[in-house]
Image: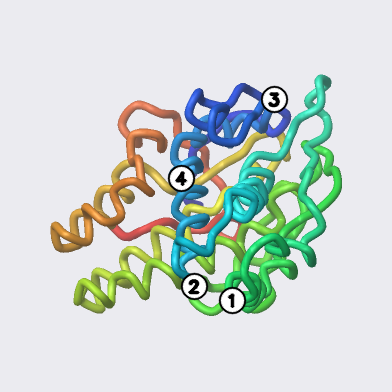
Amino acid sequence: MVNAYSLGPLNFCGDAMPSAKTLCNINYKIPGVTSKFSNLFTNDIRTFTTASLRAVPSSQITPACRAEIQNFYCRLFFPSCNNATELITYNLPNCTNYGNKCPQKVYDGLHRINICQVVPSGSFRTDVCVKPNVQGTKICPNPPANYLTPQWLRHEDRLNDRSAQGITQALKYYNVSASCTKTMQQFVCGSQLFCSPDKTRLLTTATQRTCHNALKCLPIKAQQALDKFFDCSLLPNEKTDTAISVPLDAALISGTS
């Protein structure tokens, strides 16, 4: 058995934080866990948008191009909940046309990473748990046999793996040791959310402690570079939050002791 912690019921929806509402023009309910982390996701959207546009000089980037890229990430990070909290819907634009309003180099760069093979589409029930899609993952290990994730998050294991790849590349720039890089990879891969055994709650084995352990191992400059992508305080506190024992083969383990 392993200790996991709840991030709320599967069928909970809430409001986005003001920063997310402003950036992404959100006037609808979003999944509860997305609401909790919406400030961090806003930082992600800004970073991914900027990174996507670096292929050409800024003088070649039109407002329409920037808006198209930003809107795509907004719809990916912030799906909508219906009033009955039964369905979560991804309102994504046509993925194959994503970046059409941008210079060719930007469009090519966006599609070179085959994001259209990863992003979800359509509506999903909040109370359905399925095996995740881990096709093509390179860093994160395959999940245990009995591990199930909410249907609307089925793609997240692949996106999480891409985050681990990106962070690994960034840590090379800061000459981070192999052991510290491994600790960070374990935390990022293990922070993926999964369903409780009774399929009523959203669980994680990531905690404030494992988050701090992953960050404190890094050189100061690397910590500062990653700081806007991590907020350990949003994760469960092992000392004050109630642990839920789940079978070892049904949970991803985050970080190291």
Q: Quarter of the image for the C terminus: give it.
A: bottom left
Q: Which mark is residue 55?
A: 2
* Mark 4 and mark 1: Cα distance apart in space: 47 Å
Residue type at tag 3:
Lys
- Residues packed near mark 1 inside 10 Å, few (<14), some (14 to 19) or many (20 plus): some
Q: Which mark is residue 29?
A: 3
Of labels 3 and 4, the one closer to you: 3
Which residue is at the front of the view, 244 or 157?
157
Mark closer to the chain start, 1 or 2: 2
For numbered disc 4, what is the local secondary structure? strand
Q: Which residue is mark 4?
A: 3
Identify the colour scheme used.
rainbow
* Picture layout, residue 137 above or below residue 72: below
* Mark 3 and mark 1: Cα distance apart in space: 35 Å
Residue type at tag 1:
Lys
Q: Are marks 3 and 1 in contact (CB under 8 Å)?
A: no
- Residues packed near mark 3 inside 10 Å, few (<14), some (14 to 19) or many (20 plus): many
- Residue name at image x 49 percent, y 72 percent: 55
Q: Are marks 1 and 2 in contact (CB under 8 Å)?
A: yes
Residue type at tag 4:
Asn
For numbered disc 3, what is the local secondary structure? loop
Mark closer to the chain start, 4 or 1: 4
Judged from this view, the residue extending furthest toward the left is: 220
Task: Indicate the position of residue 135 as horizontal and vertical percent values.
Answer: 69, 75
Mark closer to the chain start, 3 or 1: 3
Which residue is at the front of the view, 167 or 21?
21
Q: Which residue is mark 1?
A: 105
* Mark 3 and mark 2: Cα distance apart in space: 34 Å
Of labels 3 and 1, the one closer to you: 1
- Residue name at image x 52 percent, y 55 percent: 49
